[in-house]
Image: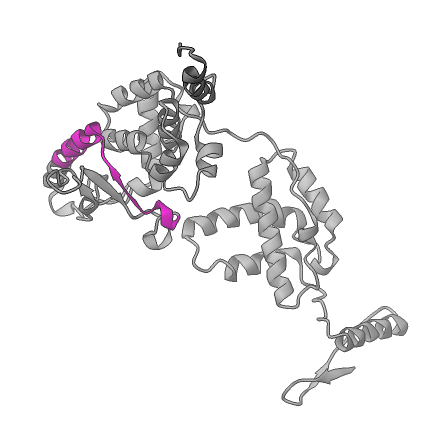
Amino acid sequence: MTTGYSPAGKRIVRKASGKTKTEAMDKLRELVRERQDETPAEARNFTVADAVNDWLAHGLHGRSAKTVETLTILANGHVISALGARQLRKLTAEDVDKWLAEKAKTLSTRTLRDIRSILRRAVHRAQAREKVRRNVVLLCDVPVGQEGRKSKALNFQQAKAVLAAADKSALRAYIVLSLLIGARTEELRPLTWSHVDLTGKPDADPPIPPHVMVWRSVRVHGDTKTRKSRRSLALPARCVEVLRIQERKQAFARTLAGDDWQENDLVFASAVGTELDAANVRREFRKVVKAAGLNPKEWTPRELRHSFVSLLSDNGMPIEQISQLMGHNGTTVTELVYRHQLRPVVQHGAEAMDRIFANEEGHEVA
């Protein structure tokens, strides 16, 4: 049946089949109505798997290879395996709700959000290309999943033990900087010597201390996580000391490698000058944690950043200042995600009120 004409004047023909002539005619009439209502005809045999695979192939431009790999694993393992055979036009909100409820028995809430996002984006892309009329995933909420692994922070004694154990590690400087300046692991791995100033300008007005410029990361295009993350941080004396030692060690490693050395100006490099990967760092960090008397399975390098926040907070530094050091846009993430309060009682209010009313009533502050 002819349902209309293209802008070039060519006939638009639609076909339909059925077990009976009546069934075939009913399908044709539905196609005509869709055309008259200016609504797209849904692709009859386009499945959820087709939509997800199309999104994985064409909807992830600009993403890193690692991100694409992670999303592909989640899509294949949880979305396509469970819903892939379903025709997309027949997918219902009830189907999605049941799928998420079943996955909630074994997956964390974070992973549930990720797989729902994959399905939502895949269906949205299919909808934009007139494969389906609506996105039913938007009607479905993410249920509460299993308890995930919570990040934690080293207390002062644990932090001292880790720093002591790091003295014998090849990653000594890396661990000291992670704990004492709070940089992300993804910001330290690509750090270059050109962004490290171990002298500063003490005669300047105001004086410029030794510092490190956190301007790069291992993310796509080398940018930091956010614009606020691009920051310069003063170096504690201990960091200056270990970085000077790191310079000497790296000079020896360069000589030892000879022609095999690849000069990348990296502060933390492999035996031949190449960038460390996350697995290298994680493996060496666990050795240090074990030497410090802690369970290596319970700690990851990124928790040094959490420890940085909690130790400063416990020492009385305002959350606004800590947020600036962290490179956060505001205090919310610093407060809710990174700060693991070590003090059992928050004392600021009581201490302030004692000072305010001490003079008024003649009471002395204890």
The quarter of the picture where residue 214 lies is: top left
Classify residue 232 as left or right of residue 279. Answer: left
Q: Quadrant of residue 356?
A: top left
Residue at (23%, 31%) from the top-left corner?
Answer: 173
Pick the residue in front: 37 or 94: 37
Residue 12: x %, y % from top left: 71, 82
Magenta segment: does it hold 142? no
Percent of width and height locating residue 321: 36, 35
Quarter of the N terminus within the rendering:
bottom right
Asked whether 241 falls inside the magenta stretch, the response is: yes
- What secondary structure is the magenta-colored segment mainly? helix
Q: Quadrant of the C terminus?
A: top left
Classify 44 as above or below 194: below
Q: Nearer the viewer, residue 62 or 304?
A: 304
Q: Please, is residue 335 above or below residue 205 in the view?
A: above
Residue 308 appears in the picture as rendered: yes
Q: Magenta segment, which residues? A: 226-249
Query: Residue 18: where, in percent of width, then height?
Result: 83, 69
Q: Residue furthest bottom?
A: 9
> At 35% from the left edge and 27% from the top edge, which residue is drawn?
312
Q: Residue at x 36, y 39 (%)?
A: 324
Horizontal side, residue 38 vs residue 142: left or right: right
Where is residue 232? Give x, y as percent. Answer: 26, 43
In which image quadrant can residue 122 be found? bottom right
> Eyeballing the image, is 9 above or below 208?
below
* Count of residue discs: 0
